[in-house]
Amino acid sequence: MRQSSSKRNPNPMEWKRKDLLGLEELDREEIELVLTTAESFKEVSRRYIKKVPALRGKTVVNLFYEPSTRTRVSFEVAAKRLSADVINIAAETSSVKKGETLIDTGRNVEALKADIIVIRHNSSGSAHLLARNVGISVVNGGDGWHEHPTQALLDMFTLKEKFGRLKGLRVSIVGDIAHSRVARSNIWGLTKLGAEVVICAPPILVPPHIEEMGVRITHDIDDALRDADAINVLRMQFERDERNAFPQQIDYFRHFGISTERLKNAKKNIVVMHPGPINRGIEMSSEVADSANSVILEQVTNGIAVRMAVLYLVSHAHDKINEATD
Amino acid sequence: MKLLIKNATIVDPACDVHAELDMAIEDGTISHIGAHLKEEAETVIDAKGKVLMPGLMDMHVHLREPGREDKETVATGTLAALKGGVTSLLAMPNTEPAIDTKEHVQLLKGIIGRSASAQVYIAGTLTRGRQGKELADFAAMQEEGIVALTDDGSSVDDEGLMRNALRLARDRRLPVICHCEEKTLANGGVVNLGLISTKLGLRGIPCEAEYKRVERDILLAEEAVCRIHIAHVSCERSLEIIAKAKKRGVQVTAETAPHYFTLTEDAVSGYDTNKKMNPPLRSTQDKEAICQALRDGTIDVIASDHAPHTESEKEVEFDFAEFGVIGLETLLAVSITELLHTKVLSLSELVSRLTSNPSAILGLHKASLKKGCQAELIIVDLHKEWQVTKNSLVSKSKNSSFLGRRLQGVVEYVILGDRIVHKARH
């Protein structure tokens, strides 16, 4: 970041957190700082030698309790482009009765003198538990249904790139909101930056009191598309359905799926996002996924810049905190 | 041995006393109550400005012994009780083994005889091993002295079995304590279903899981003409059902715990597992309804639901952490701070919900300061402040919801018979 030629007046605020656990606890300035930091890192991936020495000598551990390819690879690429060493641990979910506890695993990683743990876990709040119990930095790579802050940051980064701003944008989030950490992080982040958020899902997939998080609810996809500047289409995770409460796949596409036909009533340049992997033909038609409106692959590219920014910021904040206490 | 307590504000809802008086205790029995007693005594306590009241009866305590002595024992649990002003308690039978046979009652009685510092009453299970499959032997357990029946920790799902249990309990004149939870509605949840489950991305427990079972148990008890007591009520809808049943003459009583009238689901933010209990902390509206019900008498009893768990069972992912919090040492102080000083309840209303009401429900006509009664009383400074810290707790487990809180109300003396069994350190 330091070597980059930052165009605008660099944000005077400083990042002070050793961890990034969620967007709920961040304020607007902190989110903007991540986004502007990511802008300067994006250029690194376009260089002939795609590497800067910002985290040389640092070790990043990807501690993944849930299978994930894209998030893990994105963090790995981001760390390597910052010259950090990366170790991937695919861990079994611990339980009280058997196996190593999360805290013990975290402390062991800390004892290896790693600097940052990126954790992905199927239990909400596990990143918080880990961060409370280790001194090194913790980045939440997705915890249960709770938050996926770097995904929301890259979604916001992509929107900002397209529109030049977030304030006043109308973004509709469509799909299984109840079980989506991507939805929650996007809601916190977008509302803090002044965007208007509409969520659209069958009633059973809308969690109670979500309107108190500052969103408007609709169950009508055409309503969600009307006047929307962007839609973020979530993956339907039919495998989660324990009680046959979800709509049938075919029915879902009929009522909520994004098709070319449906987009005819939307703004012409509506931006279509998806955190991936896409179920083509279920939440979105192939035609839409591959259309000019779709920014799905740009999201993947931007994910690297955003994660570089996050790793860089937490690492420097951690070093600062340590210097202060030494 | 003679003990004289001078200038105490005596509060005894059982006989409607509320005055500044002296009390003499001779050979463990209350011998005189009056103004300016001139008697000589070996020990004289000046209780000017303090309240003298019956010792608390906490009718919902998990002592964990036998079986989980790593969490709590009869010895440590009853010491914690005395420190909190609890002189009598009802031990819940969900131990390992469960208190479900004559032999297991005897086993627990033996432990109590050897190690209890407070008076421990025993509840037996409704079903063998708390499995909800076949009834325990109520008669044999009653011969050994149990005073109530409960499968606390779970509800008896089998309605036919529950119906039989209530009819048999009625014949034995034993109250049945109901843990009201319908598992399919609870749906594996870990917090209240509401804004908190939405924000934290945790599975929620709807109020229906509680009140649907409250309703069922009340209807079954009404038909069986059996006395039932609804444990740990957490939500408004349950209270509406209980109030209606009371109005039409069903012999139902109800209890809540201090966390339900003090905390709401917001307290869980940050994934604090010391705020994870079953039923879960509910909404502000539910909390206010609980306070109202304490005032109007829909809720008869405040009990701690003291549920000790080790640090390794609590310092884990929120989903995996055990349900429950300790409460013996904070029961009185939280009640004083949150109900008395806020004028939700008067002092004598508060004392009745902590002493005479639970005693009457269990058929123990004690918790009174009448002349001739065995002394079982406490002297309390209602205004003295203290902070709840892990170090301040004598319970073996430290999983309190109130860690860090400043509370008012310190138990200065606990007197059992002719002995001062606890004295606050100054």
Image (tube, rainbow, N blue to C red):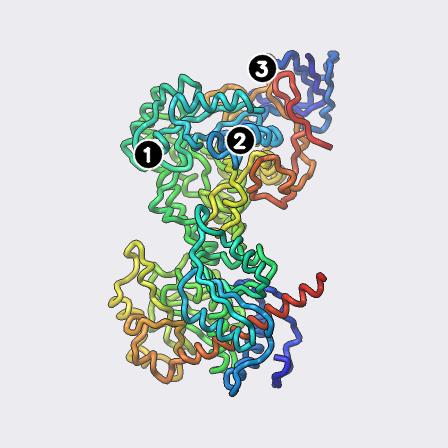
What SS does tag 2 mark?
loop
Marks 2 and 3 on same chain? yes
Q: What separation in Å lies between label 2 and label 3 (alpha carbons)?
A: 29 Å
Q: Residue placed at 41% from the left, 36% from the top?
A: B179
Report which residue position mark 2 lands on: B73
- Quadrant of the drawing holding the N terminus of chain B: top right
The answer to which image quadrant residue B82 occupies is top right
| B201 sits to left or right of A109 | left
Which numbered disc, 1 or 3, marks the residue that appears first in the sequence?
Answer: 1
Q: What separation in Å lies between label 1 and label 3 (alpha carbons)?
A: 40 Å
Residue A277 screen position, x and y as percent: 36, 71
Report which residue position mark 1 lands on: B132
Residue A95 screen position, x and y as percent: 44, 50
Marks 1 and 2 on same chain? yes
Which numbered disc, 1 or 2, marks the residue that appears first in the sequence?
Answer: 2
Residue lying at the far bottom of the rendered structure: A48
Return the chain for callout 1. Answer: B
| B208 sits to left or right of B374 | left
Q: Are marks 1 and 2 in contact (CB under 8 Å)?
A: no
Residue lying at the far left of the rendered structure: A250
Report which residue position mark 3 lands on: B373
- Quadrant of the drawing holding the C terminus of chain B: top right
Q: Residue placed at 56% from the left, 68% from the top?
A: A59
